Image: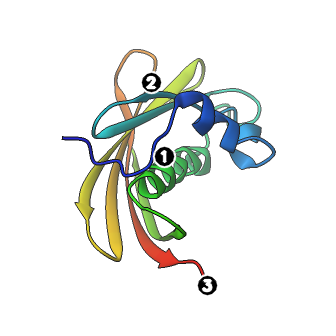
Amino acid sequence: MAIWKREATLAALNASGENCMVAHCGIQFTRLTEDTLEATMPVDARTRQPFGLLHGGASVVLAETLGSMAGYLCTEGDAQIVGVEVNANHLRAVTEGEVRGCCRAVHLGRTQQVWQIDIFDAQGRMSCTSRLTTRIQLAR
């Protein structure tokens, strides 16, 4: 059963990231199923730290991008999503190519959501696991 309450296409999701950090980091939404949202991010000069590894903060940007967008897709009307807590465990260094994030709901409550975002390297090995808690706010 689909968890999404809003209609969305990958083209629309990608257009929403223009002119902000999502585009700056090269994040592209690539897959939307009934209960998951996926995106890729290049490992390049924009996302590496000075020692040539994927920056942990860039992994968190990918995780929060996925969880926040998934959270928005699970709301209706004027509701807005704000992140209230994010954590990440960096498990494997990535130096090139791209990473793929896969976002799944852990909890979908009336005012709060929890999202699990796992990030994989090009060989399918998990490089980071992250959890994002979001709050649903009604627009004022």
* Amino acid carrying mark 2 in the image: Asp
The residue at 58%/50% (across/down) is 61
Q: On the picture, is 43 further left or further right than 86?
A: right
Looking at the picture, tell me which residue is in the foreground, 39 or 70.
70
The earlier-in-sequence mark between 2 and 3 is: 2
Mark 1 vs mark 2, CA separation in Å: 16 Å
Mark sitting on residue 140:
3
- Residue 3 image offset from top left, x and y in percent: 28, 48
Mark 3: which secondary structure? loop
Badge nearest the viewer, 2 or 3: 3
Mark 1 vs mark 3, CA separation in Å: 25 Å
Mark sitting on residue 66:
1
How crowded pointer 3 is (Cα within 10 Å; few <14, some 14-19, many 20+) is rated as: few
* Amino acid carrying mark 1 in the image: Leu
Q: On the picture, is 128 further left or further right than 39?
A: left
Q: Which quarter of the image is occupied by the C terminus?
A: bottom right
Residue under numbered circle 2: 121
Relative to residue 22, is residue 110 depicted above or below? Answer: below
Report which quarter residue 101 is drawn in. Answer: top left
Residue found at the far right of this picture: 19
